[in-house]
Image (cartoon, coloured by chain):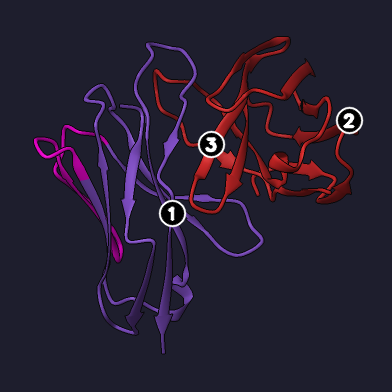
Amino acid sequence: QQQVKQSPQSLIVQKGGISIINCAYENTAFDYFPWYQQFPGKGPALLIAIRPDVSEKKEGRFTISFNKSAKQFSLHIMDSQPGDSATYFCAASKNYGGATNKLIFGTGTLLAVQP
Amino acid sequence: DAGITQSPRHKVTETGTPVTLRCHQTENHRYMYWYRQDPGHGLRLIHYSYGVKDTDKGEVSDGYSVSRSKTEDFLLTLESATSSQTSVYFCAISSAGGGSHNEQFFGPGTRLTVL
């Protein structure tokens, strides 16, 4: 019940296309859903995050869509660019009421945007 | 990398030897985390700290111990390294815990190989 399942494992998109990565979770207590971006040889960096009280959040070309009833959320990258080529991780955590924010990560998606 | 350094960046060791990885932060953040990253598993939490001398286990803590004697330093020790502990280890920090879901900032990682 603690798992976050992520798909696809890898994705190839043409420049200018839309990249879509999906995640699903079981634990209905999760209340914070971030996406992290990781370039080779670097640590992950927060890209965008959403809470379950909204169905969509957009920041520039990046959008999170959230479906609470289906327990699914997805990352959409519009107008994908070669510079977006990276590994993307979804994650989830639940509010422990002041305790540590422990993130549960998906297994990652390797995105390659071809020029 | 948000004022986080990890040392060493690369290490090769032999089975059965003790290994200590260091995470140092200059942000004065209260919370610190150790993760391991393996293909097909994403990032998994090993141990975390919510203050000086306050630590707790994550989901994959067996074979690892941690210590935090100063706000800025969080040490991860493999008491007797095994080949299954070959991985990339990431330290992360955040200024707050579950109550506010503050962003976790990741360090550059340490690649550990156990022969």
Q: Which mark's residue is nearer the viewer, 2 or 1?
A: 2
x then y, percent, for residue A61: 30, 66
Residue B31 visible from this viewpoint:
no
x then y, percent, for residue B82: 77, 37
Q: Chain of mark 3?
A: B
Callout 3 crowding tier (Cα within 10 Å): few <14, some 14–19, many ≥20: many
Q: For the residues tagged 3 and 1, is the chain the same? A: no
Callout 2 crowding tier (Cα within 10 Å): few <14, some 14–19, many ≥20: few
Give the side of residue B93 with respect to residue A49, left or right.
right
- Is disc 3 placed on a helix, strand or loop? strand
Which chain is tinted red? B
- Is disc 1 placed on a helix, strand or loop? loop
Give the Cα separation between the discs numbered 2 and 1: 30 Å
x then y, percent, for residue A69: 9, 35
Q: Residue drawn at (33%, 79%), measured in percent from left and top?
A: A13
- In the image, is residue A43 above or below residue B98? below
Which mark, residue B18?
2
Is residue A63 a member of the stretch shown in magenta? yes
Per the image, the residue denoted by label 1 is A108
Q: Residue drawn at (48%, 75%), measured in percent from left and top?
A: A83
Span colored in magenta: A51-72
- Callout 1 amino acid: Gly
Per the image, the residue denoted by label 3 is B44
Which chain is tinted purple? A
Q: Residue drawn at (87%, 33%), measured in percent from left and top?
A: B16
